[in-house]
């Protein structure tokens, strides 16, 4: 795991984030399109070249079907149906 310093705000709850911890993938800066989960509201966001944004409906559907995201959601007791 590595920490990436990048100030962002959650597009769902507006919580300020000073850094992001990468739990999968390469060390360093997350790729555009990588998923972030807010430590406050626990909703997913998508990295862009200049911050993070809400996922599209199609991206949310992909996440709902992704076993890694479902495992995280089950751990939090919030698995999407």
Image (cartoon, rainbow, N blue to C red):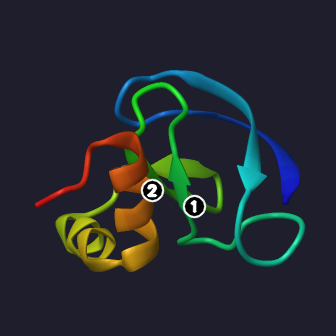
In the displayed structure, does residue 54 sit left or right of residue 79?
A: right
Q: Which mark is residue 61?
A: none
Which image quadrant for residue 81?
bottom left
Q: Position of residue 13 (x, y in %)?
A: 38, 24
Q: Which mark is residue 48?
A: 1
Q: Residues within 10 Å of mark 2 (few under 14, many from 20)?
A: some
Q: Nearer the viewer, residue 78 or 13?
A: 78
Task: Name the residue at the left extreme.
Answer: 81
- Label located before the other in sequence (1 or 2): 1
The relative height of residue 10 versus residue 16 in the rendered view (above or below) is below
Q: Residues within 10 Å of mark 1 (few under 14, many from 20)?
A: some
Question: Which element is circle 1 on?
Answer: strand
Q: Position of residue 78 (x, y in %)?
A: 26, 44
Quarter of the rendering occupied by the N terminus: bottom right
* Residue ID for mark 2: 72
In the displayed structure, does residue 5 sit left or right of residue 12?
A: right
Question: Which element is circle 2 on?
Answer: helix
Q: Residue at x 65, y 62 (%)?
A: 49
- The Cα atoms of the two marked residues, 1 and 2, are separated by 22 Å
The relative height of residue 37 versus residue 24 in the rendered view (above or below) is above
């Amino acid at each position: 795991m590595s920490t990436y310093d990048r100030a962002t705000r959650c597009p769902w709850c507006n919580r300020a984030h000073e850094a992001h911890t990468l739990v999968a993938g390469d060390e360093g800066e997350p790729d555009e399109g990588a998923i972030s989960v807010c430590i406050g509201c626990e909703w997913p966001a998508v990295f862009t070249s200049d911050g993070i944004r809400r996922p599209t409906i199609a991206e949310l559907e992909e996440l709902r079907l992704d076993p890694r995201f479902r495992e995280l959601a089950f751990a939090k007791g919030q698995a999407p149906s």
